Image: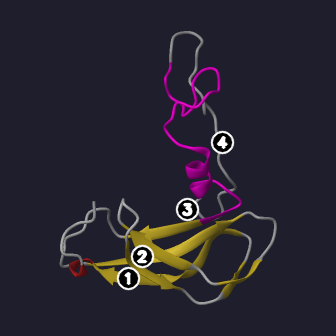
Amino acid sequence: MKTKYFSGFQLLDLHDFPGQGTALIGILDAFWDSKGLVTPAEHRMYCQPAVPLLRFEKATWRNGETFTAKAETANFSGGTLKGITPSWTVKTAAGQLVFSGKLSKQDIPEGTGQQLGEFSFPWRALQKPPP
């Protein structure tokens, strides 16, 4: 969804392939039952008509650095999303709020790579890495 002008993706082999040997490749078993890897609610967080996306420089950060991200969206909801105020949060695994903020109110046109804004926060504000 982060590739501009890309029209979608296939869910080929969403389930394990049971024929001609075994290929344990999917998030569902050969009978289309969940293997418990992801819940339907978790799957909808990254696969739905409108999905928030982030672009950031790297995946590993040092305490003295500042995390900066560009927020985007892939909007295939069937039309423009009007009057949206995107917000962002950073929470610990236990759900404790660490950082949060809002971006400018805007209309989000249909398509992918729709720019929403940029945000940043200093990692040094944390005494230790969140669990």
Q: Position of residue 106 (x, y in %)?
A: 67, 87
Q: Nearer the viewer, mark 4 or mark 1?
A: 1
Distance of mark 4 from mark 3, alpha carbons? 15 Å
| Image location of residue 16, percent across then percent down | 56, 24
The residue positioned 54% from the left and 34% from the top of the image is 27
- Whichever of callouts 3 and 2 sits on the residue coming sooner in the sequence is 3
Please give left or right for residue 70 compared with residue 19 in the image: left
- For this orientation, the residue located farthest to the bottom is 104
**50 inside magenta stretch:** yes
Circle 4/circle 3 CB separation < 8 Å:
no
Disc marking residue 120? 1
CB under 8 Å between discs 2 and 1: yes
- Image coords of residue 52 (percent x, y): 58, 67
Q: Which residue is mark 2?
A: 69
Whole-angstrom CA distance, mark 2 to mark 1, is: 6 Å
Determine the image quadrant of residue 95.
bottom left
Specify the amino acid type for callout 4. Gln
Q: Amino acid at mark 3?
A: Lys
Residue 51 is tagged as: none
Q: Which residue is mark 4?
A: 10
Label 2 and label 4: CA atoms lie apart by 28 Å
Along the polypeptide, which appears first: circle 2 or circle 4? 4
